[in-house]
Image: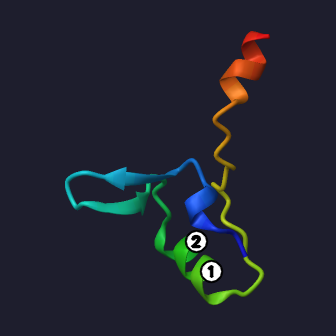
Amino acid sequence: MINCEECENYDFDEESESYTCLMDLDMDDFEHYVLSRDARCPYFRIRDDYRIVRKQN
């Protein structure tokens, strides 16, 4: 199972003062993701703070 806290699309929303996913999942995608044990989020991207630095070198 994917840990949303490691995804770069999981960000703090100052308005609601909570962490939320920045991607808009439609109802079918969300239901499939929540109800399936082995479902993978199609928008998951690992948070990699060093990606920009590697591109510069």
Q: Which percent across, then down, holds residue 9? A: 53, 50
Residue 46 picture location, percent across and down: 69, 49
Hey, what amino acid is under mark 2? Asp
Quadrant where the image shows the N terminus: bottom right
Q: Residue at x 57, y 47 (%)?
A: 8
Q: Quadrant of residue 17?
A: bottom left
Q: Amino acid at mark 1?
A: His
**Local secondary structure at mark 1:** helix
> What is the quadrant of the C terminus in the image?
top right
Q: Position of residue 33 (x, y in %)?
A: 62, 77
Q: How many other residues sit within 10 Å of disc 1, few (<14), some (14-19) or many (≥20)?
A: some
Q: Tag 2, which secondary structure?
A: helix
**Label number found at residue 47:** none
Give the farthest residue toward the left.
Answer: 15
Discs 2, 1 touching: Cβ within 8 Å: yes
**Residue on which disc 1 sits:** 32
